[in-house]
C-alpha cells in the first residue's frame, strides 16, 4: 500500500514539525496563589512584550517551589514565606531576595459560624475559639507559605492544633484550591490567601469571617537561583524578570490587576516590609 | 470561561447542565487556548504511544514465542509494572531529569518531551503484557507452520506482529487511553505550564482547584469525546483494512 505509506510518512513529518520553535524563556517556580488568582496571566504578557522573554510558571506550594529552586530546575523562585526564603538565601541556593508585593490572609468559615468568630479583628483569638469549639478546621498541611503562616498563627494563639489531628483539625496536604473545596464540602474553617479566595468559585456556604489583623500580612519575595551552583540557570534572563517585577512598570502592572474592582496584590518593592 | 456563582440548593444540578453547555460552547467557538491544550494532549499521548509500541510490541511478541529460563519471572514483573502508580513513575523521571539528576544537562524537565517519556514508560509494560497475551494464542495456531518454514523465534516476531495487527489495535487503544487519561506523572514532570506543558488532564485538575467545577467537567467531557473519536477512527481503519485483506 504505497499510498497509505506515503500518507503516514507525511503525517509523521507534519507531526514532528509541530515542535515548538525555540524561543528565549525562563522557568519560574511560584505559588498556586499567584497563578490561580490570575495575576500571572495578567502581568506576564506585559513582561514578555517588553523583553521578548517567555515566562514558564510552575505553580507549587512555597516549600516545594523552593525545593525546585534548590535542585536548579527553575531559574527564578517567586514565593511567600519570609523565613523559608531567608533560609534559601542563607544556604546559598539563590538570592538576594527582593520584596515584590503583599496581600493578606483571611480566615474563612461557614456562614453559620459555630465557633462564633465573625467580626473579630484578633485572628489568634479566633483560632482559640475554633479550638475550644473543636469546629472543623482545614489545614493545607503542604509546607506552603499559607501553611507556614497558619502554623505561626496557632503558635501565637498558644494552641497546639495537632492534638485535634484527624478529628477537628484536618490536614489535606494540598494546594489552596483543593483545601477550599474541602472546607466548602465540610463547612470547615480555614486560612486562605485573599487572592485565591477572590478568584475561587466553589464557595458554597463559606465566607470571610476574620480579616484586617496585621498578623495576617502576606509578603511575596523573588530570588534568582544561584547560577554558580547550577550552571544551567538562565541568569541574565532571570535577573531581567526580577528587575522588571520591582521596576515601576512591573509594580504598576501588579497594582492594576483586579477581580471585580478589587485589587488583589499591593506592590511594595521600594517600601520597608512591616515586621521585617 | 465562567461558571455560576450560585449557592442555592439546585446548584449541583445546575453545575452539570452548565458543564454540558460550557463544553458545547468551547467546541463551538473553538476556544484557542482549549484547542492548544487539546492538541498538546494528543501530540504527547500519541508520541508516547508510538515510542512505547516500538519497544512494547516486539517485546510482547518475543515473549509470546521465546522460551527461556526466567521467562515466568519476566512475565510477572511485566504484569506488575502495568500497575505502576503514575505518581511513582513521575517522581522517578523527575529525579532523573532534574538538573541535579543524572540526565539534568539535557534540560528536559518541565517540557513536553518529559511528559512523552513519562507516558511511554507507563504504557510500554501494558503494551508488552497485553500483546504477549494476544500473540501467544496466535503463535499456538501458527507455530507448526512457521517452524516448517524454518523460522526461529526471532524470525517469527515480525510475522506474528503483522498477522496479529487487528488484535494489536485494541492493545494500542488501551495504551492510548491510559496515556491520555493520566494526570499524576505529567503534572510532576511537565509542571502544568500554561501554553507549554498544560494538557487536558492537568487543566482539569487546575480548574477543579480553582473551584470552577463546571469548566473542569466541560474539559473532561471534551477529553472523553476526543478519546471516543480516536477509538472510532481506529475501529473504522480496522474494518476498512480487514475488508481489504479479505
Image: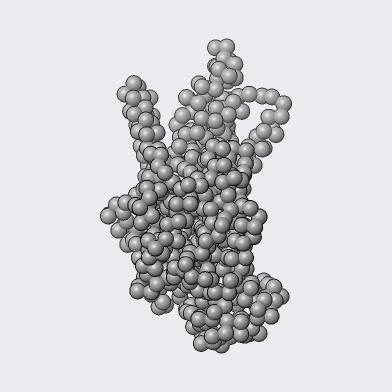
Q: Nearer the viewer, residue A154 or B42?
A: A154
Residue B116 x %, y %: 49, 40
Question: Measuring 40% from the left and 48% from the top, which residue is drawn there?
Answer: A53
Q: How many marks?
A: 0
Horizontal placement of A93 versus B231: left or right? right
Quadrant of the drawing holding the C terminus of chain A? bottom right
Q: Residue furthest left?
A: B29
Q: Nearer the viewer, residue B133 or A15?
A: A15
Q: Nearer the viewer, residue A155 or A136?
A: A155
Relative to B134, say whether A181 is above or below.
below
Relative to B33, say whether A23 is above or below.
above
Residue A267 x %, y %: 44, 68
Horizontal placement of B176 versus A261: left or right? right
Question: Measuring 46% from the left and 48% from the top, which residue is drawn there?
Answer: A237
Looking at the image, what colour scheme do you see?
one colour
When asked about the image quadrant of residue A36, the answer is bottom left
Question: Measuring 38% from the left and 45% from the top, which residue is drawn there?
Answer: B39
Residue B240 x %, y %: 34, 31
Relative to A234, say whether B161 is above or below.
above
When asked about the image quadrant of residue A60, the answer is bottom right
Residue B218 x %, y %: 38, 58
Question: Measuring 52% from the left and 49% from the top, which residue is drawn there?
Answer: A75
Amino acid at each position: 500500500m504505497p499510498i497509505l505509506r506515503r500518507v503516514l510518512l507525511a503525517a509523521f513529518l507534519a507531526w514532528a514539525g509541530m515542535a515548538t520553535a525555540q524561543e528565549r524563556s525562563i522557568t519560574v517556580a511560584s505559588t498556586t496563589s499567584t497563578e490561580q488568582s490570575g495575576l500571572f496571566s495578567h502581568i506576564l504578557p506585559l513582561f514578555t512584550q517588553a523583553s521578548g522573554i517567555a515566562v514558564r510558571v510552575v505553580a507549587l506550594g512555597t516549600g516545594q517551589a523552593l525545593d525546585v529552586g534548590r535542585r536548579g530546575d527553575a531559574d527564578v523562585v517567586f514565593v511567600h514565606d519570609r523565613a523559608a526564603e531567608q533560609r534559601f538565601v542563607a544556604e546559598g541556593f539563590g538570592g538576594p531576595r527582593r520584596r515584590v508585593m503583599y496581600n493578606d490572609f483571611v480566615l474563612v468559615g461557614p456562614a453559620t459560624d459555630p465557633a462564633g468568630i465573625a467580626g473579630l479583628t484578633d485572628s489568634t483569638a479566633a483560632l482559640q475559639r475554633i479550638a475550644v469549639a473543636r469546629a472543623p478546621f482545614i489545614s493545607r498541611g503542604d509546607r506552603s507559605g499559607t501553611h507556614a503562616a497558619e502554623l505561626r498563627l496557632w503558635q501565637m494563639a498558644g494552641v497546639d492544633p495537632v492534638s485535634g489531628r484527624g478529628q477537628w483539625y484536618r490536614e489535606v496536604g494540598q494546594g489552596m484550591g483543593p483545601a477550599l473545596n474541602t472546607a466548602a464540602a465540610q463547612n470547615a474553617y480555614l486560612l486562605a490567601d485573599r487572592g485565591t479566595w477572590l478568584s475561587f468559585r466553589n464557595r458554597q456556604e463559606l465566607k470571610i469571617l476574620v480579616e484586617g489583623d496585621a498578623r495576617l500580612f502576606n509578603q511575596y519575595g523573588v530570588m534568582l537561583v544561584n547560577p554558580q551552583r547550577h550552571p544551567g540557570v538562565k541568569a541574565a534572563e532571570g535577573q531581567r524578570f526580577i528587575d522588571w517585577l520591582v521596576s515601576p512598570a512591573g509594580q504598576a502592572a501588579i497594582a492594576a490587576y483586579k477581580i471585580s474592582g478589587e485589587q488583589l496584590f499591593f506592590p511594595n518593592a521600594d517600601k520597608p516590609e512591616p515586621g521585617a | 470561561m465562567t461558571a455560576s456563582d450560585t449557592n442555592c440548593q439546585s446548584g449541583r444540578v445546575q453545575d452539570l447542565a452548565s458543564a454540558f453547555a460550557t463544553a458545547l460552547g468551547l467546541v463551538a467557538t473553538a476556544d484557542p487556548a482549549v484547542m492548544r491544550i487539546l492538541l498538546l494532549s494528543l501530540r504527547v499521548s500519541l508520541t508516547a504511544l508510538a515510542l512505547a509500541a516500538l519497544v512494547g510490541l516486539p517485546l510482547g511478541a518475543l515473549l509470546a514465542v521465546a522460551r527461556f529460563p526466567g521467562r515466568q519471572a519476566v512475565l510477572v514483573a511485566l504484569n506488575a509494572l502495568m500497575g505502576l502508580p503514575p505518581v511513582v513513575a513521575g517522581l522517578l523521571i523527575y529525579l532523573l531529569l532534574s538538573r541535579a539528576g543524572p540526565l539534568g544537562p539535557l534540560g528536559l524537565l518541565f517540557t513536553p518531551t518529559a511528559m512523552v517519556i513519562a507516558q511511554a514508560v507507563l504504557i510500554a509494560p501494558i503494551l508488552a503484557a497485553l500483546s504477549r497475551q494476544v500473540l501467544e494464542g496466535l503463535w499456538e495456531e501458527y507455530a507448526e507452520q512457521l517452524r516448517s518454514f524454518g523460522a526461529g523465534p526471532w524470525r517469527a516476531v515480525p510475522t506474528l506482529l503483522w498477522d496479529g495487527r487487528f488484535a494489536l489495535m485494541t492493545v494500542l487503544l488501551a495504551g492510548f487511553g491510559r496515556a491520555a487519561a493520566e494526570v499524576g506523572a505529567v503534572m510532576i514532570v511537565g509542571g502544568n505550564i500554561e501554553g507549554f506543558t498544560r494538557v487536558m488532564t492537568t487543566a482539569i485538575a487546575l480548574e477543579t482547584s480553582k473551584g470552577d467545577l463546571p469548566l473542569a467537567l466541560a474539559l473532561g467531557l471534551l477529553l472523553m469525546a476526543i478519546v471516543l473519536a480516536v477509538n472510532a477512527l481506529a475501529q473504522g481503519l480496522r474494518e476498512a483494512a480487514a475488508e481489504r485483506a479479505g
